Image: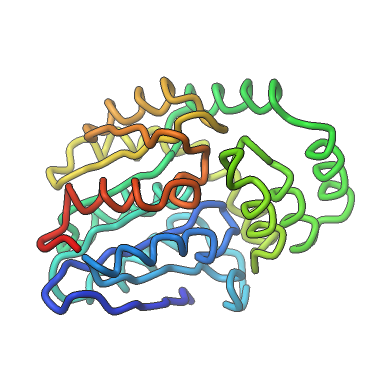
Amino acid sequence: MIKLTQIQGPPTSPTLVLIPGGPGISSLSIRAMDILSRSFKLVYVDFPGTNGNPYDKDRSFDELASDLHQIIKDIPGKVITVGHSHGGFFAAEAALSALNISGVVCISTPFTEQCFQAVAENFEDKKTPALIAAEKSWDAHPSDKTFALWLAEYGELYFSPDKLSRGRELLANDPCSHKAFLHNQHDVKLMGALLDEFALWQGQKLFLSEDKGMIPTHALKKDSDIGGFSFEVIQGSSHFVMFDRPEAVARSIENKFAINKG
């Protein structure tokens, strides 16, 4: 089952369906986007295992995407899907199946093998001794806690310097799911074909990129071009773009999709 958290916005506004990254990270990681309730109705998504939602069984990406489609197709009015990182796969996939989706926003989503290769090279170049130690602890004793503490040590790969301490606290205490991560982590390598299919989709598309973080901007720009997105770099942000610069992200989404701003 998918857990939803709804926040009311203007009555006649479109609905944003907001999907966290991961796999295995909760919607609390993207709640900086609450400010968008000034212009949209909001629906946050938590997949099984996250944010108090029980992990009852393993589900593939296709199974989770099908479950999400069943929810989205019943939302009245216009819907825009917004996905951060891994959540961008679900945002794009939903648009291919749910007829009421008029727009898609992907935030620092690496679709192609080339983009993942750039991530791997950047990761090896920038990882710290604290991150290496946290990764070893996670590998030795996989659990929700060691998973959360591993992610919390990604440091400036994930968060801008001015948000580093708060970002670490956010992820260290995230109600995440290591089971979801272990079961779904390999799906991320299969999304190049999804991007090619999504390129033919005719709705509005916006790609928001981190500035200096885990994924090089030039690699994200290439993926954005393949998918036919409008592309914007959010200055001063790392991978958790909406946490680092929530107002800038909100303005970009409003400028593209809002009916009445503010």
| Residue 117 image-quadrant placement | top right
Can residue 146 be seen here? The reply is: yes
Residue 159 higher or lower than 63, as above or below: above
Q: How many marks?
A: 0
Residue appearing at x 87%, y 48% in the figure = 137
Quarter holding the C terminus is bottom left
User: Splitting the image into 4 quarters, where does residue 259 fall?
Assistant: bottom left
Which residue is located at x 40 percent, y 47 percent? 89
Judge by depth and name the residue closer to the eye, 242 or 133. Answer: 242
Which residue occupies the foreground of this view, 252 or 69? 252
Residue 124 position, x and y percent, is 71, 24
Name the residue at 39% across, 44% down.
107
* Up/down of 126 relative to 97, above or below: above
The picture places residue 22, in percent across and down from the top left corner, at 56, 52
Would residue 154 be found to the left or right of residue 100 on screen? right
The picture places residue 199, in percent across and down from the top left corner, at 23, 35
The image's colour scheme reads: rainbow
Residue 246 shown left or right of residue 128 in the figure: left
**Residue 85 visible (yes or no):** no
Rendered position, 199 above or below 165 = above
Q: Which residue occupies the foreground of this view, 259 or 94?
A: 259
Q: Position of residue 261 (x, y in %)?
A: 16, 60
Q: Residue at (54%, 59%) from the top-left corner? A: 29
